[in-house]
Amino acid sequence: MSSSIAKRRRACVAAVGVAAVALSAVVAAAPAAAADPVTINLVTFNDFHGRIENDPNSAAAGIAALAGAIDQVRASNPNTVVAAAGDLVGASTFASFIQNDEPTIAALTAAGLDVSAAGNHEFDQGWADLRDRIQPAAGWQYIAANLHDRVTGAPIMPEYYTTTFDGVTIGFVGAVTDELPSLVSPTGIEDVIVGDVTENVNRVADDLRDGDPANGEADVVVLLVHEGAANVTLAAATDPSTPFGHIVTEVNDNVDAIVSGHTHLAYNHVIDGRPVISSGQYGEKFSNMAIVVDPETKALVSMVNETFSLKTGQTLNYPEDQAIKNDIVAPASAYAFERGKVSLGSITADLTRAKQANGTSENRGGESTLGNFIADVHLWAAQQTVADTQIAFMNPGGLRADLRYASSADYDAAGNVTYKEAADVQPFANGLVTLSLTGEQIRAVLEQQWQPAGASRPFLKLGVSEGFTYTFDPTAPVGQRITSITLNGEALDPQATYGVVANSFLAGGGDNFTVFAQGTNRAESGVSDLQSVVNWFDAHPVGSPDLAQRAVGVQVSAPAAPEGYVAGETITLTLSGLEFTSTEPVAGTVTATLGSASVTADINRTVTAADDLTGQATVSLVVPADIGGANEIAVTTPTGTSVLVPVTVQEPVVKIDTTTVAFANKVIARSNQQIQMTVLVWADGEKVDGTVTVYDGTTVVGTGTVGKHGVVKIKVSKLSVGSHELTAVYEGNGTFNSSSSSSWPVYIWR
């Protein structure tokens, strides 16, 4: 921190004390009056996502209520500026989606929005769409300091925005998350360089404070950044290892406040004297920051932010702007209603996204019936034009709503799927792209589900099409977690080439799935993701969830020998990812089968964190004697899950039978005479080796090694007076079975 910056922050703090002293002096002695401080109200919101309607089933109050709140603030103080932190359009609900967010743009313009950071969803249809369609129609200015033209290096949009009230200028610096290339289709921003947020924000903020009117000047600087904290705690906002924490801790003191978004959370912190805020999502809340400035010194006296809910239960807390409600929202709703109630087909049960432990919040790290269903639909759609397409992948972030069986309206019978419901699931209008990937590249795609360090979501579960299954070891090192892949029951060949389909976002390498961008034989299908669902239901009037898990976590105990397991050895499987996390029927048990061995165990369905580990069990089975070589353990559940776990079992050895014959050199002997057994061991056509042991009953009285021609002579240890029965036992080895001779009688006297 430079000394000039440090001095400025101290001056702002001191100004509060000076104002208080001056006020007391006015009351006591009424000296010459100083200019009254200028108060500016900054109204902010973020992640609106086209929620123009008042939703009776959620906290989203609609644009008319938000505009009404803005009207109230402006009525109380004309020195009001309205700003947003991005994602105003894109991933919108049907009323706005069906008209490509034109109602949202019109309504936010009418509400008086002045400026917004560009969010990642503003780029859903590419930079050209934002530049040529959205920005010209918007009554507000999009800004971003960290986006530059790849060729010229120039900013692709204004880096800052200023407005002046009673001689005080407030400036806004914009920035979008530097994860933008992984959040939108890379082809849509191929001409854009996404720079470091902190570096570029500090550069522009410094310009606004340097006294040079040529590069803009401002008395107060606010950062509008489409990046946010992982949770609402102060620790999350200040953790320098996270993208947002890095911004909060590294943006310099020329920035007076940080207005954030992207993670859809509401928080209202003061960090090192600087407000750091976010207002949640979907127009559920807004913030009102009172900024007080001395108009003569331009010193910042105070900044106090409050966040307000637009609804309490289903009661609006602010009067709706009737012009926006009647002239923009109502016609958009009516148009969407007619378009949206068209029936596409029906479903037999819920198709849902994965859920977190609370049962409602989305978990993009979990396998879901909806993700797999959409992958099935995309595969079918691709095969209509590219018949040899074999595998489909679906990114979880492309699924924005569940497809529910229950009726949603009087015209929507239970099980009916309307156009609106289908559009709410996939609102991005991404095209389907076919391409070729090798088996090894497909394995790499699956490995990329584990996101790079620092990503806001550490794991993103891809939906996959029917017939494609795989196992993974969640404890293995990065890049080594996929343990087996099968396509229609056959192991995927690393060197073979497979036909793949994905939406254009994923096919371009979005969500850090960069391997997709390496695919060859790329072709646009000409069908959007939503249109593929419409077409599928036209050909298949009824859809049902597949309750089988297509990926299962498997940790396998290691064999005692590097050559593989042996008959009688115990194999323990630690299994995970056996259960879905929403309304699906519970599998309950899992069975592991290897040859004639089969074991069933109960499944623990406790929902885990943002991953794909829900549904855990441990199964141990003993390797049967009737198998050998490359084998597979079949892991199955009553709900249809079936994956194969490859194991190697050492081939059972078929030993050769032997015959042992033995006789002693004496039948009767004195106690001082040596007894010697001659033993012959043979097998048909084989030279026998190994050890022979001579027993007197159960007592060992001599041993020897089979020699040439299978003969060994063994001296027997001294025997007691009396009768004895001597038996020779060939012990056998890895090649030959053991065998025993008949007993030989010996009598010892005196």
Image (spheres, helix red, strand yellow):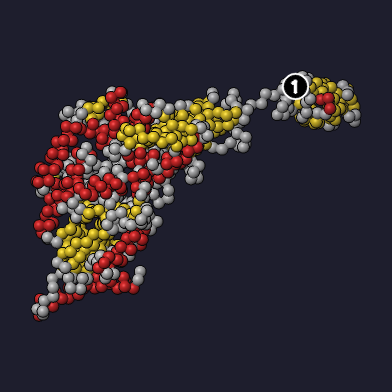
Image quadrant of residue 625?
top right
Please provide percent x and percent y for residue 26.
Answer: 11, 76
Relative to the observer, which residue lies in front, 368 or 666?
A: 368
Can see residue 85?
no
Disc count in the image? Answer: 1
Residue depicted at x 29% and y 39%: 428
Please provide percent x and percent y for residue 431.
Answer: 33, 36
Q: Is residue 79 left or right of residue 476?
A: left
Can see residue 482?
yes
Image quadrant of residue 416?
top left
Q: Secondary structure at mark 1?
A: loop
Please provide percent x and percent y for residue 44.
Answer: 21, 55
Does 269 appear above or below 490? below
Residue depicted at x 20% and y 48%: 137
Image quadrant of residue 397?
top left
Q: Is residue 79 left or right of residue 265?
A: left
Residue depicted at x 20% and y 43%: 102
Please provide percent x and percent y for residue 429.
Answer: 29, 37
Q: Quadrant of the N terminus?
A: bottom left
Does 90 appear above or below 630? below
Q: Quadrant of the C terminus?
A: top right
Q: Which residue is mark 1?
A: 658
Q: Residues within 10 Å of mark 1 (few under 14, many from 20)?
A: some
Q: Amino acid at mark 1?
A: Thr
Residue depicted at x 40% and y 43%: 509
